[in-house]
Image: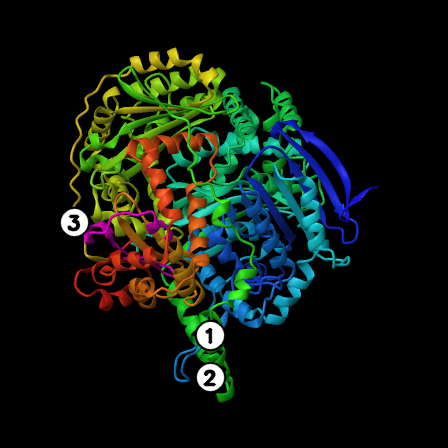
Amino acid sequence: MTERHGFARIGETDIPEINTKARLYRHTKTGARLLSLENDDENKVFGVSFRTPPKDATGVAHILEHSVLCGSKKYPVKEPFVELLKGSLQTFLNAFTYPDKTCYPVASQNLKDFYNLVDVYLDAVFQPLITPLIFQQEGWHYELEKPEDPLTIKGVVYNEMKGAYSSPDRLLVEYSQHALFPDTPYGVDSGGDPRRIPELTYEAFKAFHADHYHPSNAWFFFYGDDDPERRLAVVGEAIRGFDALKASTEIADQPPFAEPRRVVYPYAVGAEESPKAMVTVNWLLTPTEPPERNVALHVLSYILLGMPGSPLRKALIESGLGEDLAGVGLEGELQRMYFSTGLKGIAEENAERVEALILDTLRELAEEGISPQTVEAAVNTVEFRLRENNTGNYPRGLALMLRSLTTWLYDGDPLSLLAFEKPLEAVKRRAQPGSGYFEALIRGHFLENPHRVSVLLKPDLELEARWNEEERRRLEAIKATMSPEEVQKVIETTREIRKMQETPDPPEALAALPRLHLSDIERRNKTIPLDLSTRAGVPFLFHDLFTNGILYLDLGFDLRALPGDLLPYVGLFGRALVEMGTETEDYVALSQRISQKTGGIRPQVHTATLKDGETGAGWLFLRGKAMVSKADDLLEILRDVLLTVRLDHRERFRQMVLESKARMEQRVIPEGHRLVMLRLMAPFGSADWAAEKMEGVSYLAFLRDLARKVDSDWDGVHRSLEAVRTHLIGRGRMVVNVTLDGDSWASMASKMDAFLGVLPEGDVDRTGWRPESLPLHEGLVAPTQVNYVGKGFNLYRTGYRFHGSALVASHFLRTAWLWDRIRVQGGAYGGFSRLDRFSGDFAMVSYRDPHVVKTLKVFDETAAFLKSLSLNQEEITKSVIGVIGDVDRYMLPDAKGFTSMIRHLTGDDEDTRQRMREEILETSLQDLRRFGDALGEFADRGRVAVLGAASAVEEARPVCGDGFQVTRLL
């Protein structure tokens, strides 16, 4: 067998489904595995993954994921990962810790940049520095500044997981998995339980790296249009010095349960009047292979839960026992798949009723059969998604890497789920009407499967206080046992960590990092094809792009036609169009027809300030897609929902309101930074105000009130929904956006004209939104162990006018100043800055942050930092390139068409964008300092918003002074 760079090829095949040639290799010396996918996708992807099943919940795999990216033998800088974020054209750069693996993927459209990323990541994972101080910074450490101070614990992962353990939805998923796999590594939290993380020693941390981060335990992956020979050469050189290692990373199979089980866990809630519980019923299923069974279970999951009218979803939602679905549905990324579903927002005493309802519904489906329409809808949707391969903002290669690992990691065939044609066709053959195929799967995998666990998550008003008190007492006890010398050692370690964090990297070490230069950057923006016209009086945008035979159609409705008091209804109205049913079919039949005939129709709300910097605008889009051969069906469905939607079905609308409320409440803690950002921006302009009304804290309050009004004043609610329809649905307030290749469009243009012709004409009146005032500063209280701290103001009100260099300044703040001060030194999981170039809104927000006042102080010092900045041109160039990477971000065809439309609607024309690009490329140190001047009033005039526990929120009051108002969210 011929070797290339130490690799022997052990398989080769074409995968026409993804237009790819696949070659599989084994490294002769170490046994490392390498999958090489060759195709014409310019968005190249590399990943190296390790099997890392944990033995306990100390978070060792997670802490290693962070730590190996903090400097390596070849690149001994503090954080090469951040240096890459500053100055790369990357389309993806991150790392993931799963329950059984750790993955390090990168992606870029630029060949030189791509191999720079590969080089740094390979050295990071195999030759990391991982010193004790890095372990303490990223994992955990005791912290003391003075002997008399109380002992505290700090660490990036420690604080990240305190945030994760504040989210009940995340806990429910974690506990459900643990309960199904109690005797395996899946029975502990690979991310780390904050109460267990301090048990991890540096010695165990180092040993885990030595045992797991080795080529013998590595799975390498390449995808894209780069030279396949170079792939082998680069990896071969990186692992040349390694010998084979017997890595004991096999994952033992979970012994089956003899009978079903029930477990109960608490979760922390705030001072709610009647806190609700959550329950899931969970089944352990089969391994991820063979592929036919894998595809069949994905189709079955969609049958049961995937559509608004799916039988199991419908039974749960219509039961009135809860507010929204709980559980993940089918989980297919572990050694064995599992299925999890239930309800959140239930009364604790109804948990067994939910369990019985799930079992009874499954039993009824198995005995009486699943409707052929439901099966057809599910098969069509799964097939459409496989063929479209639409991965949104993620590179397609990354999705294929993760899919391959669901079999490959467990010594299976990495291609079995990538080559989906045969298993899909097998499922379609077996699933003919009357075959009983899916009914048999329900019996075998659910009804006759005793490996089932019901998990109840109970609200506990005292849990947060108990956890905080337990931690305080534990730290007091630990400090009490310390000798004066040990206390001094903690103080010295605290200083050493701070010194490490504050000491700049040596210039020669930074210079060793591979990087791009301005000469590697295109001077011209990438453009998206756009043809503008008017059809039936409606502005029409067409993008001639190859879409593999899929029509992407966006119908936009101008929200400026709505009075401000109706704006909060927009999201629910958008859902109602496709989830309430029409005059001729109920919502079950409608959802089946959408899934049978199309690739999906979904509502999306978008708000923006226009180019003039003053006008706020918003749109409700109905975004549909279908094969060109099914374009008639898509247009017919859209016509039906726009003209004949039933808005008078109170019970169905109540279900949607409760679902939306539960989802908003679920997002409060994990997405606290987003709520803080929306709240900060709301007073600055009408678009910001509208966004907050439709997506932020105001919307949560609206949903809670609406849930009561549906029962007490349904006539009033119904009138509001009808008013939204009257104001929005009409050609005079529409825009149409089509993304498709020109030849296919030519065959259906007349169909679009006929569709538009049947819609009401409508008027073009636009109301003036009048934002109401908000408190100057705000505290938002939720039961969380970490905080989300934000400050913002409007730059343009100080006289500053946009220049492309402002984006470079904002990027530099995010990847340097805020990263160093908020994450590295402050121990938060993240810090962000955001500038809207049309509105002038500027904000900084922290994520999963142990601090409040210290973070606000960092925000207030930002202007001085920029004004006194001393930076060489090479460092500025890194940020310039990073911003160009954002400007030139990779997009799939539907995203290109949608983005082009938004640019047109906001006035973001090509001349404006090209001028911005040139200003970005010419950014100088003086430009960054000028941005600091523009932030001169930020400390005094900026608005503050803090989301956290009550005690943390109160820390902000003395800093904010008058005008600080506190609102309890949860």
**Res 773 label:** 3
Q: Residue furthest bottom?
A: 484
**Res 92 label:** none
Please tell me which residue is depicted at 49% across the width and 57% down the height of the picture.
Answer: 83
| Depth check, front residue: 209 or 514 | 514
Label 1 belongs to which residue?
499
User: Label 1 vs label 2: CA separation?
Assistant: 27 Å
User: Label 1 vs label 3: CA separation?
Assistant: 44 Å
Label 2 belongs to which residue?
480
The magenta segment: 780-808
State the image coordinates of residue 122 (x, y, percent, origin top left). Answer: 63, 54
Q: Looking at the image, do the residues carrying marks 2 and 3 touch, with CB atoms under 8 Å apart? A: no
Could you say whether the residue bearing mark 3 is in a helix, strand or loop?
A: loop
Please tell me which residue is depicted at 73% across the width and 57% down the height of the picture.
Answer: 247
Badge 2 amino acid: Ala
Could you say whether the residue bearing mark 1 is in a helix, strand or loop?
A: helix
Determine if the magenta segment contains residue 806.
yes
Mark 1 or mark 2: whose residue is earlier in sequence: 2
The residue carrying pointer 1 sits among few (fewer than 14), some (14 to 19) or many (20 or more) residues within 10 Å by Cα, namely few
Badge 1 amino acid: Lys
Q: Looking at the image, do the residues carrying marks 1 and 2 touch, with CB atoms under 8 Å apart? A: no
